[in-house]
Amino acid sequence: MCGRYSLTTSLDKLLPRLRGPLPPGLAEHFAPRPQVRPGEPVLLQRQEHGQLQVALALWGFVPDWSRDPRTTRRPINARSETVAEKPFFRGAWRHRRALIPADGFFEWQPRTVDGHPFKQPWLFRRRDRRTFWLGGLWDRWLGRDGGELESCVVLTTAPNDLLARVHDRMPVVIPDGLEEAWLESVDGPALRALEPLMAPWDPAAWEAVKLERLPGETALQQLDLLAHPPGETAGG
């Protein structure tokens, strides 16, 4: 599961990793985000018509065949084990994979404190604090009135040893150096060859940080978040 992540890296440090022109206005309005939430614009790297692009998409997936995004369920996570089979994600898995830059992600551990249920937030990040790629999918919905909506979803996989004590799912992380292979539009055996990239990743270079409160949350927001973590309704 991945219901929150962070991207606190400055744009000048991200640019060497991004390929393609930036979306209009991004350079002027980009700001580090200690907490990226579902429903917010997400920075991502993609390939379309053979060209690498940097884009913004709303976090909460709407397939291109949806009749109305206002009534369509909009999952924030998709299980990597079944993404090739489920009609909701199948088209995007074949042709519209994405890389989502992040420098940390959050998970919640169910606990009991003084007899009361409690969700303990944890931050997972690389020990060297480097930015990494979350594996995702994107899609573009076109309305009859000419309206357009680009959206995305984060892929999840089984947890590694670092995550297993906190949650039964974790986000897919695409290794450095395999970005173009992940983004290329392929089918058949070449598509199946990507499946090992979605396996649980080696936790040796990672760390788990126990938090009292998520970055950028007020006390009231934090109480609501701990009572209703995003993973409980995300469908991942």
Image: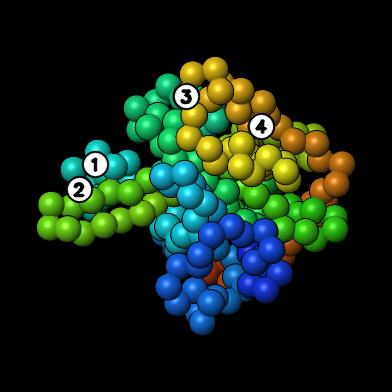
Q: Secondary structure at mark 1?
A: loop
Check if mark 2's residue and mark 1's residue have beta carbons within 8 Å: yes
The image shows residue 222 at horizontal and vertical percentages of 57, 66
Q: CA distance from mark 3 to mark 4?
A: 16 Å
Of the pair 211 and 191, the residue shown nearer to us: 191
Amino acid type, label 1: Ser
For residue 219, above or below residue 70? below
Q: Secondary structure at mark 2?
A: loop
Q: CA distance from mark 4 to mark 2?
A: 33 Å
User: Residue drawn at (53%, 77%), measured in percent from left and top?
Assistant: 27
Binning the other alpha carbons within 10 Å of mark 1 as few (below 14), some (14 to 19) or many (20 upward) gives: some
Check if mark 3's residue and mark 1's residue have beta carbons within 8 Å: no
Amino acid type, label 4: Leu
Q: State the residue position of label 2.
A: 68
Q: State the residue position of label 1.
A: 66
Q: State the residue position of label 4.
A: 197
Please state which of the two labelled residues, at mark 3 or mark 4, is closer to the viewer: 3
| Of callouts 3 and 1, the N-terminal one | 1
